[in-house]
Image (cartoon, rainbow, N blue to C red):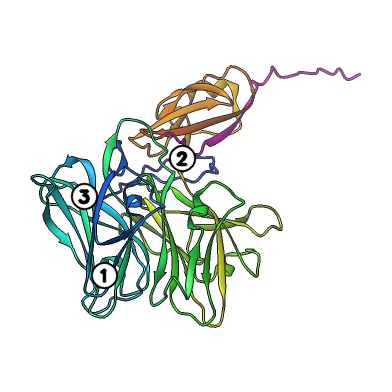
Amino acid sequence: MKHHRSPYILWTLLLVICLLGHGQSVYGQCTRQIRQYANWQTTFGSVTDAYKAADQLPATASILNAIALSTTRQWLGFGERIAAGTPVYLKLSTLNGTLGVGAGFSVQGYVNGPGATRIAVAPAVTDASLLGLLNGTGELEISLTPGSDYDGVFITVTGGISVGYTMKVFEAFILKNTASPIACNQAIDVMKGAHSGLNILTLGNVTHEWDAVDADLTTAAHMNLGLGLTGTVYETVVFSTSSTPGDSVSIMLSRDGAPLLDLTLLGTFSIQPYLGNMAVGSPITSASTGLSLRLLTAGGPIGILTAAVTGSFDRVEIRLSAIAGVALTLHLFDVTRIARKPTVAYTVNGVGGPSPICITLVGGIGFSVTGPEACDTYRWYNGTTFLGTGNSITPVITTAGEYVFYVEAQRVGCTNTETRASFPLTVTPKAGPPSLTIQNNP
């Protein structure tokens, strides 16, 4: 998963346009991808709710339990042969805070052999640090890339010398191109857990994690840390596609004990954007430039936190870190991604144009998008009247008056539309002939 960004074009304007925007090139291609989940499973050993690992629902999971000195295994198949070099992703979690001696796990691809046999495909993932098993508990996504064609993956859990080992398996999936438009900013998965010494089951927790993405402002996910703890709890929200640089993350939240009147009350709350498993920039904190907070309703407890992300991201990890002697609880009502506004340049005969402008000069008016995206289609409007598509437009104005022009971007392969950018323009009438008064003096 590798991505890049390009420079922008700077326009000289006589009028300051009250819009925010960033020039950039397209991350990746215009083709969108969707998840194809494993749809078949079988097991060896002790597995509870085995079918949930292949039900194509990322909120449900099977539970693999290996008692001391035993092995449990689950195979997940795609129902078709997958080409070598195609990454496969798994959402997993551990119910153990630490690994006992001899305990562990592995994940590996397989190909169907003669009869009911299944043959392992290299390589295997065996590094426990991938799941943070030695440093807290929680849900994470890992990936591996089989070196040969494969039919699925299998997960092996091994109990230690004196302790068992338990792991949840939510889903396995690959990414496939789709010709059908998708909701590019939709949240499609959620993960929760703890870092740095916390046990998510007993000391700190995140509950009702899916309520942060259910589009219902009467429900919320809850992030909790008790008194005297160290460490961090997190909730990760995964979106259906990677963003365009300059898109924003928006979080509606509240905290127990105090209204969110300013950013300092967020304390040890932070947001880390990711592209896959790679961090995009530094964590966004209350001190970050470009972070804004406003109340949903005047005097109300819910704040809307918005931050633009300069790089391309497909998920955000929301973190709450412990403060000695302070119990902390945050409620996440809604976590969304917002496409950036296009930036508009207004010119008259190729140079920055004035407003108001005389009706005699409107023939030279032009509007254009600054740093247009190759994967965006731009639609222009005069009020509610559609004018056309393209990176620029030359409006036809025949009468003086007040006008508001709009441009909106539709990303290729996406059903959602970017936020509209508006440009108000005052057109004054042509001055009439001068009035001449002749006065005869007696």
Compared to residue 391, the image places residue 385 above or below, namely: above
Viewer-side residue, 344 vs 210 = 210
Position of residue 39 in the picture relative to residue 257 (left or right): left
Report the residue that reaches farthest toward the right. Answer: 442
Residue 1 shows in this picture:
no
Q: Residues within 10 Å of mark 3 (few under 14, many from 20)?
A: some
- Residue type at mark 3 is Pro
Which quarter of the rendering shows the C terminus? top right
Residues at discs 2 and 3 in contact (Cβ within 8 Å): no
- Residue 257: give x, y in percent of width and height: 65, 70
Viewer-side residue, 261 vs 106 = 106
Q: Residues within 10 Å of mark 2 (few under 14, many from 20)?
A: many
Q: Secondary structure at mark 3?
A: loop
Position of residue 392 in the picture relative to residue 66 (left or right): right
What label does residue 129 carry, if any?
1
Image quarter of residue 168: bottom left
N-terminal label among 1 and 3: 3
What label does residue 4 carry, if any?
none
What label does residue 87 carry, if any?
3
Image quarter of residue 90: bottom left
- Residue type at mark 2 is Thr
Q: Which residues are magenta?
A: 415-442
Residue 418 magenta-drawn?
A: yes
- Residue 385: give x, y in percent of width and height: 56, 21
